[in-house]
Amino acid sequence: MTIAFLFISLFVFMFIGVPIAVSLGLSSALTILLFSQDSLQSLAIKLFATADHYTLLAIPFFLLSGAFMTSGGVARRLIDFANASVGHLRGGLPIASVLACVLFAALSGSSPATVAAVGSIVIAGMVRSGYTRSFATGIVCNAGTLGILIPPSIVMVVYAAATSTSVGKLFMAGVVPGLLLGFLLMLAIYIIARIKKMPAQPRVSVGEWLRAARKSLWGLLLIVVILGGIYSGIFTPTEAAAVAAVYAAFVSLVIYRDIGIRECPRVILDAARLSIVLMFIIANAMLFAHVLTTEQIPQTITQWVVEQGFSPITFLLVLNVVLLIAGSFMEPSAIILILAPILFPIAMQLGIDPIHLGVIMVVNMEIGMLTPPTGLNLFVASAVTGQPLTTVIRASAPWLILLVSFLLLITYVPFISLGLPNLLGMPG
């Protein structure tokens, strides 16, 4: 009865238009009030305790870093470097767009930020070069999902906080899958370009390539600063986020000088707004997870799954279906915080590695960002291009076949996710 009321009330609130964060908080409070021996004071304590979660401090810092990188011209220089590297291939401009998304993803940690930063520059360029607007939009919309798979990833930070797993190992587990997905997207574009005889840009000289690399060097160094600092033990992922924010501000203000001191308050305010929205969702989702835990709901569901005799293969298939459906209706961080406490003990009981589970959930969230009615990347791409949402959905849909195939590959070949962190001997 308690489980039914908790979830039914949550979906009723969302159905009548109550924001997700408020729906999570209200359904939790009502469940405690009507069915639990716990007090409402526990919800207030949990709400404030969320703000003290050290791992979650990485989120506002990564968002601030991404805001400075987007406003400070780093994205444009990365795109120029990507064009100089692969633009001469058949379909080179779309391939360069995917490469630019890969590079920017390693800076921002956010999928919508990657779509906005790269899409606002490359889509118009592709259209001028003879590609259709819908083809260009579909590519950037899908490649932008790499923002939450390639480290640093805000969604991975949320999963680590919800399950007490290693952020560093999660980040390293996302490297190979992220690069593999980027390669698969570029390969698919190249094959389509060869079949349809799409245009190629003139090959740049070695000198021009070196100039593009030199101009983008400060942005590329941030990848080294973040990941190198974490894996060398110089600082924690949370400290790395703070260093990244300071570094991004320094590069934008002092090195590139694309923004001035007067524009800093606007950049900081934009990042603060997004941070507040995200942290409010996280705080209320933590309340929801608190109710799940106090009412022994994860343990009950785990016991039921074990009694049904589900094999790991069957469980992972059901898991993907549930996450794909949830991803169509909810924000990724909220889904992680609601479902991870339920799925985590089941996965442990079935012998599924928690890092592998985290990567599977993140890839599902990537697909969720491309599926209506609440796919964030769809709305961002629509705003960037000025196209109707229905047009963006049609442009993105064909690429979903590739992403779903990639999801199955990641799900049933755990070595892709776990090979690199295990090779490095990283503790879980």
Image: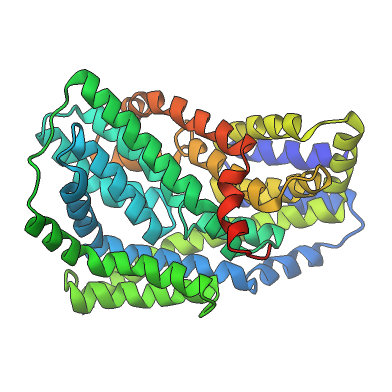
Q: Is residue 212 at least partly visible in the picture?
A: yes
- The answer to whether 272 is drawn above or below residue 400 in the figure is below
What residue is at 43 percent from the left and 40 percent from the top? 181
Residue 366 percent coordinates (x, y): 49, 41
What residue is at 37 percent from the left and 44 percent from the top? 144
Image quarter in which the N terminus is found: top right
- The answer to whether 324 is drawn above or below residue 24 in the figure is above
Q: How many marks?
A: 0
What residue is at 76 percent from the left and 35 percent from the top? 312
- Front one among 128 and 195: 195
**Which image quadrant is residue 407 in?**
top right
* Type of colouring: rainbow
Is 218 situated left or right of 158 in this image? Answer: left
- Front one among 233 and 147: 233
Q: Is residue 378 at least partly visible in the picture?
A: no
Is 231 situated left or right of 249 in this image? Answer: right
Residue 23 percent coordinates (x, y): 64, 47
Residue 229 percent coordinates (x, y): 47, 74
Image quarter in which the C terminus is found: bottom right
- Front one among 277 and 207: 207
- Front one among 328 and 163: 163
What residue is at 29 percent from the left and 30 percent from the top? 189
> Outermost residue toward the front?
423
> Outermost residue toward the top?
195
Residue 112 percent coordinates (x, y): 39, 48
